[in-house]
Image: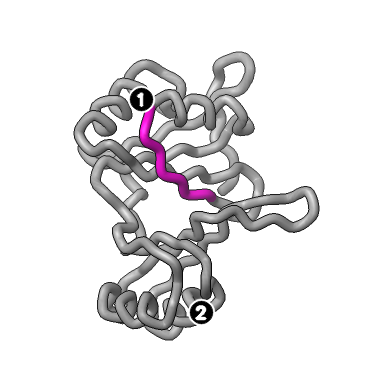
């Protein structure tokens, strides 16, 4: 049974978490898009619902109760040194730029992941001078008390997950 990201249970859970935390990370996995994902911080149910209103049906939406990607700032040599101490070798990490990248008519928030110190250093060096958030890759594969997921339904309210 698949859940809608637009139903009352999903929204009330998000509202409760936002009341507790003030901000939550939401991951959007796009259907039939070769694994494309976005990661966004939201501070209100309204901002999440506005975002959901422009997403294609079948988009997978995963929200995290606990703070994620806690190391934040502009990438400098000092930031990279701190990051290397913050993320142990062999632990999967996620880096998300918080400034929009634009190429022609396309725009996105660059993100990258990996599990080695060399990958972490390389990804951060590619984001030199840009604002980022960084942390361990959020545990998203299974819903539980700290993770909720749903899908954007089609125009008829039906949920049919796509290929991610």
> Answer yes or no: do the residues labelled 1 and 2 have beta carbons within 8 Å?
no
Residue drawn at (64%, 57%) of the image: 101
> Tag 1: Cα neighbours inside 10 Å, few (<14), some, or many (≥20)?
some
| Side of 92 relative to 125 (left or right) | left
Residue 134 image point, x, y percent = 37, 63
Comparing 98 with 147, the one in front is 98
> Tag 2: Cα neighbours inside 10 Å, few (<14), some, or many (≥20)?
some
| Side of 107 relative to 29 (left or right) | right
Residue 69 on the magenta span: no
Residue drawn at (56%, 60%) of the image: 110
Comparing 89 with 127, the one in front is 127
Residue 106 image point, x, y percent = 73, 50
Residue 10: assigned label: 1
Q: What element does badge 2 sit on?
A: helix
Quadrant position of the N terminus in the picture: top left
Residue drawn at (25%, 33%) of the image: 17
Residue 25 image point, x, y percent = 37, 45
Residue 41 on the magenta span: yes
| Side of 73 relative to 102 (left or right) | left
Numbered range of the magenta stretch = 38-44
Residue beneath disc 2: 125
How many discs appear?
2
């Amino acid at each position: 049974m698949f859940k809608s990201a637009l139903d009352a249970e999903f929204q009330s859970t998000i509202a409760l978490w936002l009341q507790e935390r003030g901000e939550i990370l939401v991951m959007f996995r796009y259907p039939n898009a070769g694994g494309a994902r976005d990661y966004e911080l939201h501070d209100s149910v309204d901002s999440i619902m506005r975002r959901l209103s422009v997403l294609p049906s079948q988009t997978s939406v995963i929200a995290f109760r606990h703070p994620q990607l806690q190391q934040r700032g502009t990438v400098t040599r000092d930031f990279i040194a701190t990051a290397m101490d913050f993320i142990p070798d062999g632990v999967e990490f996620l880096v998300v730029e918080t400034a929009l990248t634009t190429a022609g008519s396309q725009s996105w928030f660059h993100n990258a992941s990996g599990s080695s110190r060399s990958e972490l250093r390389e990804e951060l060096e590619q984001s030199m001078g840009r604002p980022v958030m960084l942390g361990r890759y959020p545990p998203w594969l299974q819903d539980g008390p700290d993770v909720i997921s749903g899908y954007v339904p089609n125009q008829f309210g039906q949920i049919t997950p796509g290929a991610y």
